[in-house]
Image (cartoon, rainbow, N blue to C red):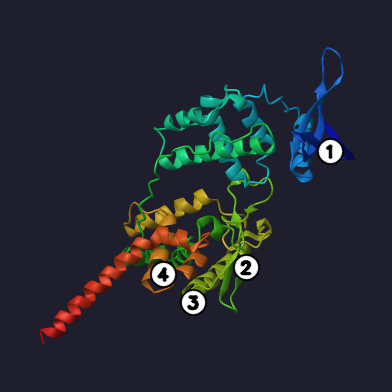
Amino acid sequence: MAKKNTARGAQGGGTIRKKTVTRNGKDYTFWEARVTVGRDPGTGKQVQRSFSGKTQKEVREKMQAAAVAVNHGTYAEPSKLTVGAWLDIWVKDYLVGLKPATAYIYGANVKNHIKPALGAVKLSALHPHMVQDFVNGLDSLSAASVHLAYKVLHQALEKAVSLGYLTKNPATGCELPRPSQKEITPLDDKQAAALLKASKGAPVDSLITAALFTGCRLSELLGLTWDAVDFARGAITINKQLARPEYRKDGPFIAPKNGKSRTINPAPSVLASLKHQKRRQSEIQLKAGPAWNNSHGLVFTDEAGGPLNQSWAERAFAAVLASAGLEGIRFHDLRHTYAVNAIRAGDDIKTIQGNLGHASAAFTLDRYGHFTERMKRDSADRMEAFMKGVLDL
């Protein structure tokens, strides 16, 4: 029987109370919330849903999430909710904090892979073996794509658990295919020299130089603004990246990939190239006249001062490659080239990680560690040849 009942108003509607019940001679205290989710069509009486948890904060979050779903017309009783219906709710209401491109990719995975396979299943009836069967059925996709689809499903179900729709996540413990890491193909010294030579005078020459000697992503360079370039200190701050046109409803910029800004100190030749870009931009501005509009102070712009689209930059890069007689090279390979050359120059992994904007040095090591090992072997071979030469004297 209940021994204690402390009622109090809850934020966002409904009620929250602290309850103590006695079972087998022991008192158990917990928090309970109730929220109105509709009316019974027969009697017209309110239909309420209750939530319980160890803390007031926990049940308030569950209650408010249900209230939001009711207001949006997306609420459904857990016993009637299908996986597809829950995924629709999750995509609509719970991806708001993600970058637009990420939210789009998650939504595409839901639409193209998860709902066709599992959408009709009752959420409460979804079991681990069904999730495993879903993963196994994605065998036509790459391992990376399978991991992404699974990640999306797992996150959606984890939110369902936190809101009380599920007691545990049926996607936990699934066996996934081993991911295969893409082969890294940095430019060798001859290729890099040919590229730089061919790029002289091209519209993207400074862009190529900056990528090759800083390791910045193309989107980061296209989002670079003059206020982030400090010529006096010899520093560049990477604090944003340019969003693709379809993701610019909240403005042209999004946060860096891992959400953190970073400051790099590039080689003097990079700063000299950016000074050249600044002079060129002034000339283009004069030519454009009143049509010029670089309101964001972008370093790399089109002829009217607007942002350069990534597709245009990649086509211009491809034209430079063709004139240099180079094939099979992506703009992103310039980033890999910087990383490998930094290792060759003796930079420590922590410094390289910071310059590249990786989340951890462990990731950088995993990505480029084999180049370090190769250079160690080459160094040993050179030392062995030297010693043999000395002994032969």
Label whose residue precedes the other's in the sequence (4 or 2):
2
Mark 3 vs mark 4: in front: 4
Which residue position holds label 1?
A: 16
Q: Which label's residue is closer to the chain start, 3 or 4?
A: 3
Of the two numbered discs 1 and 4 on the same chain, state the one appearing first in sequence. 1
Res 228 label: 2
The kind of secondary structure element at disc 2 is helix
> Is residue 252 toward the left or the right of residue 172 in the image?
right
Circle 4 residue: 342
Task: Work out how far the residue at label 3 is from the one at label 2, CA to CA, in angstroms.
Answer: 16 Å
Q: Is residue 204 above or below residue 387?
A: above
Distance from disc 1 to disc 4, alpha carbons, whole Å, reads 58 Å
Mark 1 touches mark 3? (CB < 8 Å)? no
Numbered disc in front, either 1 or 3: 1
Q: Label 3: which residue?
A: 268
The answer to whether 330 appears left or right of 167 in the picture is: left
